[in-house]
Image (spheres, rainbow, N blue to C red):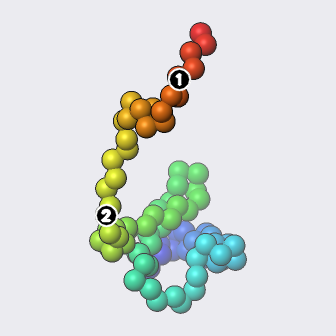
């Protein structure tokens, strides 16, 4: 349900998003998430998505970034260029 005050604006915004391919009408998928509308201070409409169900579907693979010293060591013979001041 959309508040009557922003109903026309919301319908126009949804039509624009469907037109450019951001939203798809009548699509049933496990990747879908609820969408809410919030009115901006300038009178426009902001779409807010509730992503907790989507996050629950994702598989986490934490991969720590390597330390810069380890990367340089693996590059055998690489010399760091001097920093220009």
**Quick check: 81 above or below 38?**
above
Q: Could you say whether the residue bearing mark 2 is in a helix, strand or loop?
A: loop
Where is residue 83 shown, x and y percent of the image?
56, 15
Q: Mark 1 Cα within 10 Å, few/some/many (few <14, many 20+)? A: few
In the picture, the quarter occupied by the C terminus is: top right
Query: From this viewpoint, is residue 71 visible?
Result: no
Where is residue 35 shown, x and y percent of the image?
44, 72
Query: From this viewpoint, is residue 63 visible?
Result: yes
Q: Mark 2 Cα within 10 Å, few/some/many (few <14, many 20+)? A: few
Where is residue 32 shown, x and y percent of the image?
44, 79
Q: Give the residue at mark 2.
A: 60
In terms of sequence position, does the residue under pointer 1 or pointer 2 come before the other? 2
Q: Which of 75 and 1 is in front in this view?
A: 75
Q: Which of 65 and 6 is in front in this view?
A: 65
**Quick check: 1 above or below 6?**
below
Q: Which residue is drawn at 32% across and 61% down?
A: 61
Q: Which residue is drawn at 47% across and 75% down?
A: 2
Tell me the number on the disc at residue 79.
1
Image position of 35 (left or right of 42): left
Q: Could you say whether the residue bearing mark 1 is in a helix, strand or loop?
A: loop
Q: Which label lies toward us, 1 or 2?
A: 1
Mark 1 touches mark 2? (CB < 8 Å): no
Which residue occupies the extreme front position in the image? 77
């Amino acid at each position: 349900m959309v508040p009557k005050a922003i109903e026309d604006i919301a319908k126009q915004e949804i039509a624009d998003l469907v037109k450019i391919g951001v939203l798809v009408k009548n699509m049933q998928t496990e990747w879908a998430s609820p969408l809410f509308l919030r009115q901006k201070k300038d009178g426009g409409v902001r779409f807010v998505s509730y992503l907790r169900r989507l996050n629950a579907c994702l598989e986490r693979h934490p991969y720590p970034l390597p330390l810069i010293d380890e990367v340089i060591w693996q590059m055998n013979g690489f010399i760091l260029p001097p920093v220009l001041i």
